[in-house]
Image: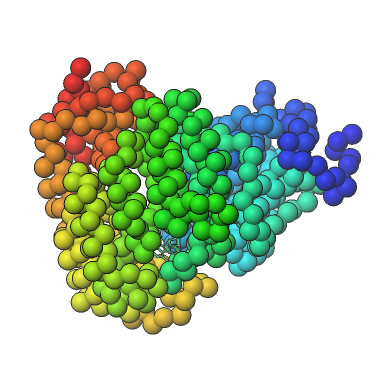
Amino acid sequence: MIQTETAKELELSSQEYLKLVSQIMSIRKRSDVPKAYVRTYGCQQNISDSEMIKGMLSQAGYSFTDNAEEADFILFNTCAVREHAEDRVFGNVGALKNLKRRHPQVLIALCGCMMEQEHVAKRIHDSFPFVGLVFGTHCLHEFPKLLYKSLVDGKRIFLRDNDDLCVHEGIKTLRDGSFKGFIPIMYGCDNFCSYCIVPYVRGRERSRRPEIIINEARDMILSGYKDITLLGQNVNSYGKGLDCDINFAKLLREIDSIDGDYWLRFMTSHPKDCSKELLDTIASSRHISLHLHLPFQSGSNRILKLMNRHYTREKYLEIINYAKEKIPDISITSDIIVGFPGETYEDFKQTLSLVEEVGFTSLFTFIYSKRNGTPAAKMDDPISAEEKSKWFSELLKTQEKIASKRCASMVGKTEKVLVEEKSKKEGFLCARTSGNIIVEFLGDESLIGTFQNVKISKARNWVLQGELIK
Ligand code: SAH
Ligand code: SF4
Ligand code: F3S
């Protein structure tokens, strides 16, 4: 009966659509329960979105598999930030063609940042006819209806470019981890850094209400989460546009006041909005980890201006020096782009000198990737890929020395760590310090998910080795 109805005639709640999906799949499933394979590319924001999609799928009766071959539903949640990320998705989607031929009843879907770009959606439409459902980041809350329509109508659905500025609450999240988890506090980005595609695929910045975030954090802490990361493209501008007296530092203080043994992290901070109030809040908090991820992208003021970043090298160093003064044990990490259009070796040397001056624990380094539709894509880019790659290696070498030195300086100290998983090394466990540095030590698996104290005995590049203090 359900199968003969056309989805268009219905306008139901998400819950009702999920119930209908569950009824359909109880008949169509390939094995004892319907199975979903969800593969996530990109940043924590995408991981968090996938956790919401998994929440909805589990409400519709799906269980999850790491083997696409046995799935009833295959979803790729995609990232558009660099060309390489997009190429990987196209390659991996192409590889599903044969699977769909062998199992025609499987529904293949694509979502996420890539799918908000018109040219990508068109390419999927024209070249990958076995993909049945495509939806962008703005349509996440519509997933139950889209899934239902796809199953019932069997027609291909493409949905994107929804100018929706709302924050949709009430979506059940199925978190991947049981002791580490994300809470998105805002969506979108208004900064329009000239190289970046994110504002075009994630839309305008909008914040979730503080009481909802605080309740979510409290629930996670009560259910045993030990490490909570607040997510946003620029968390420092949290609260703009809300009709209540809140900013990011205040939100952190509210969550920090919840009792329990846990660490509170956040990412990403934009230097232009990184206030002294925020750093003072970290310094005086009980739970905020001693880690500041503050991407600076380039050490050259000329390039920072072309990047539309709205701060200077001097302003960046002022924030860093204030942070080091107030929080002496702070671990600082950053993102850097090498080879932005028009960057010269002289500009690049400014990046190197900033890296040396700050002494980062670790760096996420990227070679500039042209993103169509961004202002930087129209700028002259005369430096060859070969030359950029030489600069890139020089940066990695510089950072390696700094990271080794920083890690070596921790030998002899006792650190509180959160034990995360088994190490590849037999009998060892992998843990992280509050500053987000990896420590390996001999210990029993039963310690995974707990805080322990470890005395640092050795440093190997950026990984520490330690001994458990009983
Ligand atoms: N909102 C965050 C991070 C966004 S994307 C922030 O502002 O810091 C993560 C990182 O990818 C960026 O910090 C930047 O270093 C890198 N990135 C973004 N666009 C890029 C591009 N076109 N080419 C190379 N790296 C890029
Ligand atoms: Fe991209 Fe800049 Fe926004 Fe970060 S702040 S997501 S780099 S536009
Ligand atoms: Fe990629 Fe989208 Fe994140 S473009 S980096 S997944 S916001």
Which x, y percent locates residue 88?
48, 54
Q: Position of residue 34 (x, y in %)?
A: 67, 30
Quadrant placement of the C terminus: top left
**Residue at horizontal 27%, vertical 31%?**
417
- Indicate the quadrant of ligand 1 in the picture: bottom left
Q: Is residue 174 left or right of residue 434?
A: right
Closer to the camera in the image, 213 or 285? 285
Q: Residue at x 18, y 21 (%)?
A: 469
Q: Quarter holding the N terminus?
A: top right
- Looking at the image, what colour scheme do you see? rainbow
Q: Point out the residue furthest to the front here.
A: 245
> In the rendered image of this protein, does residue 370 appear above or below residue 59?
below
Residue drawn at (28%, 38%) of the image: 434
Q: Nearer the viewer, residue 314 or 30?
A: 314
Q: Residue at the spot x=55%, y=51% of the render?
A: 244
Residue 366 in the image: above or below residue 371: above
**Residue 117 visible here:** yes
Query: Measured along the vertical axis of the image, is residue 232 above or below residue 125?
Result: above
Disc count in the image?
0
On screen, 191 above or below 38?
Answer: below
Of 20 and 270, nearer the camera is: 270
Q: Nearer the viewer, residue 251 or 309?
A: 251
Left or right placement of residue 414 versus residue 452 in this view: left
> To which quarter of the image does residue 296 belong?
bottom left
**Residue 439 placement (x, y as % from top left):** 23, 34
**Image side of residue 19 versus residue 211, left or right:** right
Q: Is residue 99 visible?
A: no
Q: Position of residue 230 (x, y in %)?
A: 44, 44
Quadrant in the rendering for residue 426 = top left
